[in-house]
Amino acid sequence: MRFGLIHEATVPHGTTHHRRYKEMIDEIVLAEEMGFDFWGSSEQHFLRDFGMGATEVFYGTVAAHTSRIKLRHMVRLLIKFNHPLRIAEQLATLDLVSDGRAEFGTGRSNSIITMDAMGVDPTETRAQWNESLDFIVQAMTEEQVEFHGKYWDMKTPVYLTPKPLQNPHPPIYVATTSLEMHKIAGEKGIGAMAWDSYFGWDYAEECARIYQKEIAAPTKQVGKFVTNSLSFLVLPAYCAETKKDAMEQGGPTTIEFFHAVIEIYKNLAKRSPDYKYMDQIEKIQSHINDIDYVQSTTPGLMVGTPDYFIEQITRLQALGYDEVILRLDGIMKHEELMRSIELIGKYVIPTFKSPNNIVTGGLLDVAALA
């Protein structure tokens, strides 16, 4: 089991983006120290108090402050306003300055605000993602790039400079929420990151089954090698010493976040058949203020103790997930987030990485040895 940390630059009310960006760097450095395998940020635009629009800038800063942790885009939006050649240049540059730690997570946006502002038709995002991904792989792996498609049509061949350090290219992933997108990821031979999946344990199991079937023999492989990886995003996540502390410190953020998610999904489902599956979020709407109920029905959030995290992640692992991505980013204090990262690194990650080193049982009975 691999562990990822995702930030979306959530800025608590009353503070500043400047302060939050500095705090995030400290949190990522600690995550590397505590054994997290990879870090990333989503690409969000125009959402006021959360979201990082210029991810390519921040990733370079993170690369300079870290040395081991992988840097995965979660995700770069492969839709019309992001030119594939520019994304390929930025990814290759990140791979060079990070000594080969870049990972390429992709997606097509779940924000109507972004799509409307950038003039993107939500009914065309899947086709744009598909074409852009083909274009980017070609740019990274072929000496001369020439591409002719529906959305991108080059008038003259070019040379991509620089090329990535990883040969032939960094591993490729896609955010997958629908059953269909898990199938597409497997067919293309790329990693699937189960995103915003609040539709229940049975749904998570079905997503895993579909992906595992297709990834076993990809029929439409897009990269030069297969990235066989199934991740589950837990959004939000918060770990504390006791359940009481976890609920008091992380509970309000969870409730606030879910209210926002439900509205985003309901609006998006109305705009395109490709997003219609998001209507399922209404199943938990009537229970939105009951965190215990929501957590009992879906692995999509984790608010609790290290033991609770271990229990939930073990269950995901049994379904075939080999990565978990934790969104420890919210309106909690920076100090609380740092403590949450420390608890996960100290107690949760070792359970999966080095189980033989876990000390169990009570204190040594010295009298019994006399």
Image (cartoon, rainbow, N blue to C red):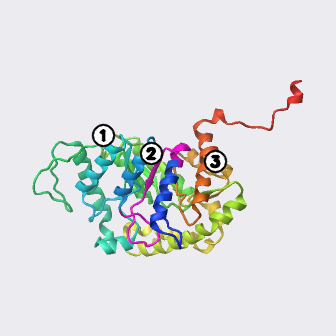
The majority secondary structure of the magenta stretch comes to loop
Q: Secondary structure at mark 1?
A: loop
Residue found at x 19% / y 61%:
150
In the displayed image of the protein, which residue is found farthest to the top?
Answer: 370
Dot 1 amino acid type? Leu
Dot 3 amino acid type? Ile
Instruction: Read off the magenta span.
Output: 30-53
Q: What number is the disc on residue 165?
A: 1
Q: Label 2: how many residues lie within 10 Å, few (<14), some (14-19) or many (20+)?
A: some
Q: Position of residue 223 (x, y in %)?
A: 30, 44
Magenta segment includes 125? no
Report the Cα–Cα distance between label 2 and label 3.
27 Å
Q: Position of residue 161 (x, y in %)?
A: 20, 46
Q: Position of residue 52 (x, y in %)?
A: 40, 63
Q: What number is the disc on residue 310?
A: 3
Residue found at x 40% / y 69%:
111
Which badge, 1 or 2, comes first in the chain's sequence? 2
Q: Quadrant of residue 283?
A: bottom right
Q: Secondary structure at mark 2?
A: loop
Residue found at x 63% / y 61%:
295
Closer to the eye: label 2 or 3: 2
Q: Is residue 334 left or right of residue 219?
A: right
Residue 292 visible at all: no
Report the Cα–Cα distance between label 1 and label 3.
35 Å
Instruction: Please state, as top left, top right, bottom left or bottom right, where the C terminus lies in the image.
Output: top right
Which badge, 2 or 3, comes first in the chain's sequence? 2
Q: Is residue 196 above or below residue 311?
A: below
Q: Label 1: how many residues lie within 10 Å, few (<14), some (14-19) or many (20+)?
A: some
Magenta segment includes 51? yes
In the displayed image of the protein, which residue is found farthest to the left?
Answer: 156
Q: Nearer the viewer, residue 281 or 343?
A: 343
> What residue sits right under mark 2 in the picture?
66
